[in-house]
Image (spheres, grey):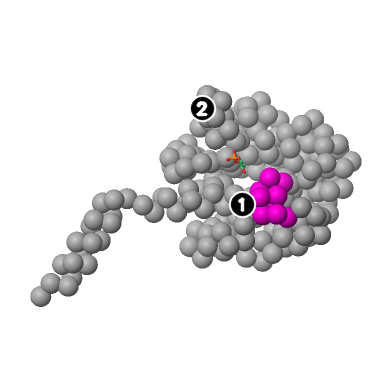
Amino acid sequence: MKFFIDTANLAQIKEAQELGVLDGVTTNPSLMAKEGIKDQDKIIQHYIDICNIVDGDVSAEVISTDFKGIVEEGEKLAALHPQIVVKVPMIKDGVKALKYFSSKGIRTNCTLIFSAGQALLAAKAGATYCSPFIGRLDDVSQDGLELIAQMRLIYDNYGYETQILAASVRHPIHIIKCAEIGADVATCPLSAITALLNHPLTDIGLAKFLSDAGKK
Ligand code: G3P
């Protein structure tokens, strides 16, 4: 399973990259705003900065909601850097745009996926990645991981090449369950990735090894 980091924070992206397990980055307008990056020139430069830190795919989200606007914006984003993947919302014009981008060889990430039907449409339209928001489903008492399992079954039934990119991942159990089910990618906050490191028996065991190593 690929690990993406879900942030626009350059320090966190660098930290994940240095850990050696990072395969890409996802951003969205909320994550950009959280870093105080709002004007268009700064957003563009920020995407380029992110691409210069990581080796993998970097999702950059359009904010237009009509076909023409999504296409114009997406083509500009895709032209910024070969690592850019155009993030498109799951709306009617978004689906049309996914099909258009796919025909032009522009890679896409269909975002705001909350049902298997939406995931099927995104795959049929040729999305490169499809992003179910599992934490937000959990927040409204629906099982986000169940959606990942439905998507895995549907995509495998028909050989869709669209990659399942589990998003709105909140904690290590989400990551482990996504890996068990067979999500292609999990995009996570840095805290969820580093939480995978921890086990109290590792700490106790290491302390014992170090203490025994110091004994004469
Ligand atoms: O990748 C989607 C993500 O940024 C949303 O996460 O925690 O706001 O639901 P969250």
Position of residue 198 measured from the top left corner of the image (x, y, whole percent): 36, 52
Q: Nearer the viewer, mark 1 or mark 2?
A: 1
Q: In the structure shown, which secondary structural element does the residue marked by tag 2 occupy?
A: loop
Position of residue 44 measured from the top left corner of the image (x, y, whole percent): 77, 58
Quadrant of ligand 1 in image: top right
Residue 143, numbered circle:
2
Please say if 210 is above or below 188: below
| Residues in magenta, as a range | 29-37
Mark 1 — residue?
7
Which residue is outermost to the bottom?
216
Q: Is residue 195 left or right of residue 43?
A: left
Residue, x 54% and y 29% (percent of image)? 139
Residue, x 52% and y 53% (percent of image)? 190
Mark 2 neighbour class, 10 Å CA radius: few under 14, some 14 to 19, many 20 or more: some
Residue, x 66% and y 61% (percent of image)? 50
Please say if 35 is above or below 63: below
